Image (cartoon, rainbow, N blue to C red):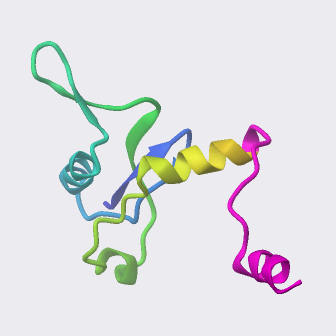
Amino acid sequence: MPYALFENDERLTRPFRTEREVWEAAERADLIEFGTHGEKTLDNNFEIKPCDATPEELAVAEDGVILPDRRSEDSQFRNGAAGPRSPQATSKQTSS
């Protein structure tokens, strides 16, 4: 059964073949905390859960982890902060 990393029920990673592969990807992405007895836990609201996957998704060799700065950018939009400008908007301003 494939597994993925989730935050608040939103899938953040591609599907991995095993739960262990998700733990390894989360550790590479620096999303793991170590408890007082050395046990590994996931940061914040992260969870590793089973998910659906096609054979093509499972064949992907990349890490598949969306790093935390993507989420912080999304939270800026939810908090009403101005987000990054699209290339079209920037070119319209500079060509005027």
The x and y percentages for residue 83 are: 71, 55
> Is 77 situated above or below 39?
below
Identify the magenta region: 78-96
Q: Position of residue 13 (x, y in %)?
A: 41, 59
Image x and y of residue 24, in percent? 19, 51
Residue drawn at (43%, 29%) of the image: 44
- In the image shown, does 19 or 7 lie closer to the viewer? 7
Quadrant location of the C terminus?
bottom right
Residue 36 versus residue 81: which sits nearer the camera? 81
Q: Residue at x 25, y 51 (%)?
A: 19
Q: Nearer the viewer, residue 87 or 56?
A: 87
Does residue 37 lie above or below 39 as drawn? above
Question: Which residue appears at 75% of the width and 75% of the height?
Answer: 90
Q: Is residue 81 magenta?
A: yes
Tell me if residue 12 is in the magenta stretch.
no
Vertical order, 61 against 71 (above or below): below
In the displayed image of the protein, which residue is found farthest to the left? 38
The N terminus: image quadrant? bottom left
Quadrant of res 33: top left
Q: Give the left or right position of residue 62, taking residue 39 as reference.
A: right
- The residue that appears at 75% across and 44% down in the rendered structure is 81
Extreme-top residue of the structure: 36
Q: x%, y% of residue 61?
A: 25, 77
Query: Which quadrant of the structure image shows residue 57?
Result: bottom left
Residue 56 position by quadrant: bottom left
Would residue 29 appear left or right of 73 to someone viewing this image? left
Query: Does 74 sit left or right of 92 as displayed?
Result: left
